[in-house]
């Protein structure tokens, strides 16, 4: 504990790191303030009365990722999610559209062009989502102005678009000038902002049952621990390096230990995001229909129901394989190894290496996909066990994966600053896999 406190003090000794952290906290504070600024003309009193009757589970989920901005009808109601949707679409286009693939291979200039197209697509998505949000949420809650004019609709849609793009700008500034990935940090802060309120509500419900509260806290910590193990899990493929010529002599690197790390959860949180996005489409399509359509709507709107979670688990497994195939290209890895003089012991370079890596990726993707599916349905299991809706959301799903992944990534960046200045790392003595070995080949 003493060493940890000393490492915290070392953070403030590094001027650049101190400035980056302060800037990051300042921009996050601005984002949080924006989530409480109500849209002009919205009747917040009526909105609070409607919320007192309780939100449905889908509204709770959407509000979770906007830090409460969605339920508050704030200028940040759409949050950062339109940008995430635009980024996913651009990634998919990179697989199917040759022009986008060409931009991806153009280096820094191509990346800037893709970012510009992503921002334009974000504005288009916001323009489509803003009217739906005002109609399906604000109007249903009875919080619309008595006689909304065309001017009110236009200005409110523009405010929602501006609020979402301002959130994107804040995230990019954090990434460039602050610490950590800005977009991911804003999502994480929005999720964490709801945790104290949900935990206090759970304590209020079970104030007479202290043992149950303690058991829930222990279960929550075990879920976090299990998620960390899944996020950090890596299958290391041993590599050997052929002799290389430096000047007039050959240098033998065969004794150096090097690895090709293949993550158990190479797809990250994307399969869950994909699956949940697909699950919301039938609800939107059948929202105004009756009969069998209303049955489908009820089944897929209940995020704690059996039908919803069974379909969600199947979609997550399918999307995990799909996204892993996008992220990991065994043939490209084999070609890169061959060009650099590296090879897997006992496997011939080239085609055999590609097949060997592909087999290993397929084997570890299956347990990885099952782990993601289990994490995704854990909130439903917690709800069945008696945890309230708001707190159950933190027992698994996208929220836990995002929180764990972003926190670990931010800690690793802070540790890099400390180690570069010959100080003890923030995670000194731990077994966090983020601590990179100099001989590990992680660039593939």
Image (spheres, helix red, strand yellow):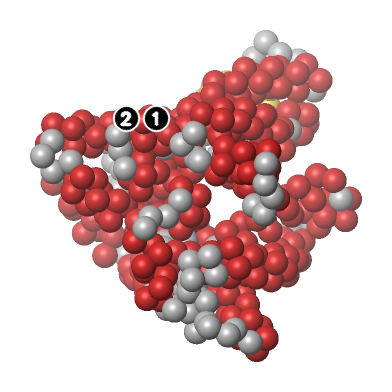
Q: Does 291 sit above or below residue 249?
A: below
Q: In this image, 374 relative to 288: left or right?
A: left
Q: Does 322 sit above or below residue 391?
A: above
In percent of width and height, residue 55 lies at 42, 55
Q: Which residue does the image show at 80% across and 51% down from the upper left? A: 93
Q: Quadrant of the N terminus?
A: top left
Q: Which residue does the image show at 53% across and 65% down from the upper left? A: 140
Residue pushed farthest top?
346
Disc 1 from disc 2: Cα separation: 6 Å
Q: Is residue 422 visible?
A: no
Q: Secondary structure at mark 1?
A: helix
Viewer-nearest residue: 252 or 66: 66
Viewer-nearest residue: 100 or 162: 162
In percent of width and height, residue 8 lies at 23, 55
Q: Is residue 216 visible?
A: yes
Viewer-nearest residue: 231 or 256: 231
Q: Secondary structure at mark 2?
A: loop
In percent of width and height, residue 116 lies at 72, 69
Q: Which residue is mark 1?
A: 381
Tell whether label 2 touches label 1 (CB within 8 Å).
yes
Q: In this image, 337 relative to 428: left or right?
A: right
Q: Which residue is mark 2?
A: 385
Q: Quadrant of the C terminus?
A: top right
In percent of width and height, residue 386 lies at 30, 34
Q: Which residue does the image show at 64% across and 52% down from the upper left? A: 287
């Amino acid at each position: 504990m003493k060493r940890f406190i000393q490492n915290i003090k070392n953070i403030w000794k590094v001027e650049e790191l101190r400035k980056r952290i302060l800037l990051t906290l300042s921009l996050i504070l601005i984002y949080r303030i924006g989530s409480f600024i109500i849209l002009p003309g919205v009747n917040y009193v009526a909105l609070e009365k409607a919320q007192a009757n309780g939100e449905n589970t889908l509204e709770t989920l959407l509000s979770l990722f906007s830090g409460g901005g969605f339920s508050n009808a704030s200028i940040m109601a759409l949050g950062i999610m339109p940008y995430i949707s635009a980024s996913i679409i651009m990634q998919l286009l990179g697989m199917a559209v040759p022009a986008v693939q060409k931009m991806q291979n153009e280096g820094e200039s191509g990346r800037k062009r893709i970012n510009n197209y992503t921002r334009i697509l974000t504005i288009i998505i916001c323009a489509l989502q803003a009217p739906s949000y005002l109609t399906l949420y604000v109007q249903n809650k009875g919080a619309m102005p008595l006689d909304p004019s065309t001017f009110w609709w236009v200005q409110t849609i523009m405010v929602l678009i501006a609020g979402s793009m301002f959130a994107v700008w804040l995230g990019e500034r954090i990434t460039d000038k602050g610490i950590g990935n800005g977009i991911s940090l804003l999502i994480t802060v929005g999720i964490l902002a709801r945790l104290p309120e949900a935990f206090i509500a759970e304590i209020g419900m079970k104030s007479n049952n202290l043992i149950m509260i303690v058991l829930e806290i222990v279960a929550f910590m075990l879920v976090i621990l299990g998620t960390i193990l899944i996020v950090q899990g890596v299958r290391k493929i041993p590599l050997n390096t052929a002799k290389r010529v430096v000047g007039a002599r050959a240098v033998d690197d065969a004794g150096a230990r090097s690895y090709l790390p293949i993550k158990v959860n190479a797809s990250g949180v994307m399969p869950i995001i994909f699956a949940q996005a697909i699950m919301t489409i039938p609800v939107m399509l059948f929202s105004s229909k009756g009969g069998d359509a209303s049955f489908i709507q009820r089944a897929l709107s209940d995020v704690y129901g059996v039908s919803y979670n069974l379909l969600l688990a199947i979609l997550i497994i399918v999307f995990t394989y799909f996204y892993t195939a996008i992220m990991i290209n065994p043939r490209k890895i084999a070609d890169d190894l061959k060009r650099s003089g590296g090879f897997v012991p006992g496997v011939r370079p080239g085609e055999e290496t590609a097949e060997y890596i592909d087999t290993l990726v397929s084997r570890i993707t299956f347990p990885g996909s099952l782990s993601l599916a289990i994490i995704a349905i854990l909130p439903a299991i917690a709800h069945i066990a008696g945890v309230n809706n708001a707190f159950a959301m933190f027992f698994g799903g996208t929220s836990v994966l995002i929180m764990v992944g972003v926190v670990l990534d931010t800690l690793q960046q802070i540790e890099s600053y400390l180690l570069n200045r010959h100080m003890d790392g923030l995670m000194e003595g731990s077994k966090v896999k983020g601590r990179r070995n100099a001989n590990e080949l992680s660039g593939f």
